[in-house]
Structures are given as C-alpha cells and as structure tokens.
C-alpha cells in the first residue's frame, strides 16, 4: 500500500511539474510572440495619419517590439466601409476616421455631428479629452466587434463648392455631400441645400463630374488631396466640428496579453493628446495653402449669426427621435459646456 501511495505521489508531482512547465512555457511564448497591427485611414498627411505614426512609434517602443505596426493611409486597405468591416471581423486591426462613418454599426456615433456646441479648436480639444465623453464613445460598438481607443479633434467643417457660397441664400438648391448622419443632413436642410451622403473617396470625382455642387468636409482634405483642381471656393461655416476616433478590432485586442492591452489603451490616449496641439498648427498652415491656390470665403457677420441660431437646435431636435441618441447627445452637450 505504501508503495502504491508513493507511486501516486510521484505521479502527482510529475503532473504538477509538467503543468508548471507548460504554464511557464506558455507565458514565455506569449511574451515572445509578435503581433501585427495594421491601421487604415482614408486620409493622408493630416491629423489621422499623424495619430497613426505617433501611436505606432509609442506602441512598438513600449511593447519592446512585441507589437509591429503597419500604416495604410489614403484608403490603401479599401474604401471606408470595407475598412470598418475589416476591423469588425479582425481582418485588419484598426481604422481611424470620423465616428459618423460608423452609424451603421451604432447610430449613436453621429452624436458628435451636433452643430453649434463647439466654437473653436481649443474647446474641441478639451471636449475630446473629456473622460465622460471618451468613456461613452469608446463603449459604442463593443458588441459589434469594435474596441474604441482614442478620440481627438480634427477641425471645423467648411463647405467647398464649384461656385461661390457668399451668402446664406447661396445654399438654396445646392447638392452638397455630407456624412451619413441625420444631424448633418438636417443641418443642410435648414440651410435650404440638398444633402447627399457619400464616402470620402467618391467626393472629388463627384465634384469634378458635377454630380454634386460641393461638400461639407475638412480643409486639410482639400489641401492634401488638391481639391482646388475641381473647385475653387471654400466657405468657412465652422459647423459642425469634426472629430476623429481610433477603432480597433475587439477580436484582436481581446487576444492580446493584458500587459499589451494596457499599452495599447495608454498609448492611444497619449497619441491623441499629442495630436490635438499639432493639428491646431497644421490646420492654420493648410488654410494659408488653400488661400494661395483658391478662395476662402466668410459669410457676412449678421448672416453667420443667423446661421448659428438656425443650427443650434438641430442636435437636440434630431436626438429626440431616438432615446439612446438623446442620452448620448446630453453627454456630449454636457462635455461641451464643461469645456467652454
């Protein structure tokens, strides 16, 4: 009997040793494994591209090379909808762009399109760093394969057009591209224009071909993609403000060791905080570049004030149509108020 007990004890010790060895081997293997992180964006040489560069540099350093980043700007990984799907299903690891492009994933992503709440770049940067707003925005899409990682301000919207928009009356009847967000579409309707939802890659050809009269978009897009070859006039409406988010594949993120997840989240926030002041300077330079090649237009002061009065209620009124969107709007409005 004693011999049997000794045999059992020896066997148990052997199993324990093997289990410990397997655990140590597994831990070592996880620490040695390299994870590829492909990031896509539709733009190039502006804040979204800049965020990717900073984020990848930080993550590669802080992970000791365990994460290797690859950056694909200018829709190299496909049009925006395909990149978003790639993130959801884990084919690529990240997409960076305005959250409004993901309204098909969760309609609350459009909340940052509410016009009239952000007045300037400094307030926009403070809002982007608001912890309550970040917590809410990063939670959207979690059940659809998306892990929100970063939020940062891009710039105020403007309107590029084939013919000049110098007065509010000039908006009437024009077909203008917007993002697929009810708030942006309602904004144009209030101004008498016809909104046309369109992804970024289709905008320039549509303007060139006369399919649309212009677009609500970003100054840094006009300059880096040489829009002045298709349209010469940019009216600086300033509304709505454009924000960008970094969306990571939840499938990929959840498979990372915990220490790498912490590095990802921490460095995503650091890169966003670093990009905000960079974008202020960059945006100013891009305005100067546009002015050298084409025309910058401001509405008369009284008409600009009239426009803002007409737009300030758009967000609240659209949000009332959907209870979840209204809750999201209240969080955004509160963050904007705190950041004034």
Image (tube, grey):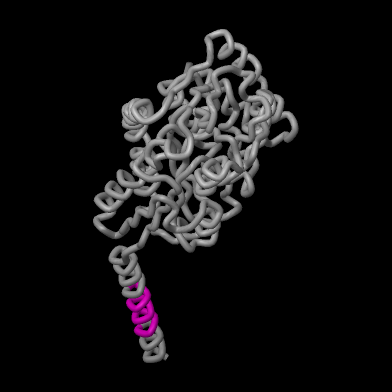
Vertically, is 77 above or below 219?
below
The x and y percentages for residue 249 are 48, 55
Q: Position of residue 102 (x, y in %)?
A: 58, 46
Question: Residue at horizontal 48%, vertical 28%?
Answer: 233
Q: Which residues are magenta?
A: 10-20
The percent position of residue 190, horizontal first and vertical second, equals: 68, 24
Which residue occupies the foreground of this view, 44 or 169?
A: 169
Quadrant hosting residue 34: bottom left
Describe residue 161's horizontal placement relative to residue 38 as left or right: right
Camera sees residue 132: no
**Quadrant assignment, res 246:** top left
Q: Is residue 204 above or below residue 122?
A: below
The quarter holding residue 72 reads: bottom left
Residue appearing at x 56%, y 53% in the figure: 81
Residue at point 57%, 40% (across, down)? 100
Identify whether 123 is placed above or below 58: above
Identified at 47% across, 20% down, the residue is 297
For residue 16, side relative to residue 190 (left or right): left
């Amino acid at each position: 009997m004693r011999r049997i007990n000794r045999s059992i004890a020896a066997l148990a010790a052997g199993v324990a040793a093997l289990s410990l060895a397997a655990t140590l081997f597994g831990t070592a293997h996880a620490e040695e494994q390299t994870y590829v992180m492909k990031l896509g964006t539709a733009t190039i040489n502006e804040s979204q591209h800049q965020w990717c560069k900073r984020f990848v540099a930080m993550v590669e350093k802080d992970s000791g090379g365990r994460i290797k980043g690859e950056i694909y700007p200018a829709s190299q990984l496909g049009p925006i909808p395909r990149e978003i799907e790639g993130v959801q299903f884990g084919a690529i690891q990240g997409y960076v762009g305005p959250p409004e492009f993901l309204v098909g994933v969760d309609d609350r992503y459009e909340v940052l399109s509410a016009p009239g709440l952000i007045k300037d770049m400094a307030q926009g940067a403070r809002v982007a760093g608001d912890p309550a707003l970040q917590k809410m925005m990063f939670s959207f899409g979690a059940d659809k394969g998306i892990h929100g990682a970063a939020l940062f301000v891009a710039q105020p919207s403007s309107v590029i057009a084939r013919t000049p928009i110098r007065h509010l009356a000039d908006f009437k009847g024009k077909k203008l591209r917007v993002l697929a967000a009810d708030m942006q579409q309602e904004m144009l309707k209030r101004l008498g224009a016809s909104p046309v939802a369109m992804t970024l890659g289709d905008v320039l050809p549509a303007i060139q071909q006369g399919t649309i009269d212009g677009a609500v978009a970003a100054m840094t897009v006009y300059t880096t993609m040489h829009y002045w070859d298709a349209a010469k006039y940019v009216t600086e409406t300033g509304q709505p403000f454009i924000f960008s988010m970094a969306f990571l594949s939840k499938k990929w993120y959840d498979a990372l060791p915990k220490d790498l997840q912490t590095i990802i989240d921490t460095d995503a926030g650091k890169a966003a905080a670093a990009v905000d002041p960079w974008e202020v300077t960059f945006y100013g330079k891009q305005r100067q570049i546009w002015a050298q090649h084409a025309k910058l237009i401001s509405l008369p002061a009284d008409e600009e004030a009239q426009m803002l009065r007409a737009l300030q209620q758009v967000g609240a009124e659209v949000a009332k149509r959907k209870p979840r969107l209204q809750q999201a709007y209240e969080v955004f409005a509160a963050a904007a108020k705190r950041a004034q």
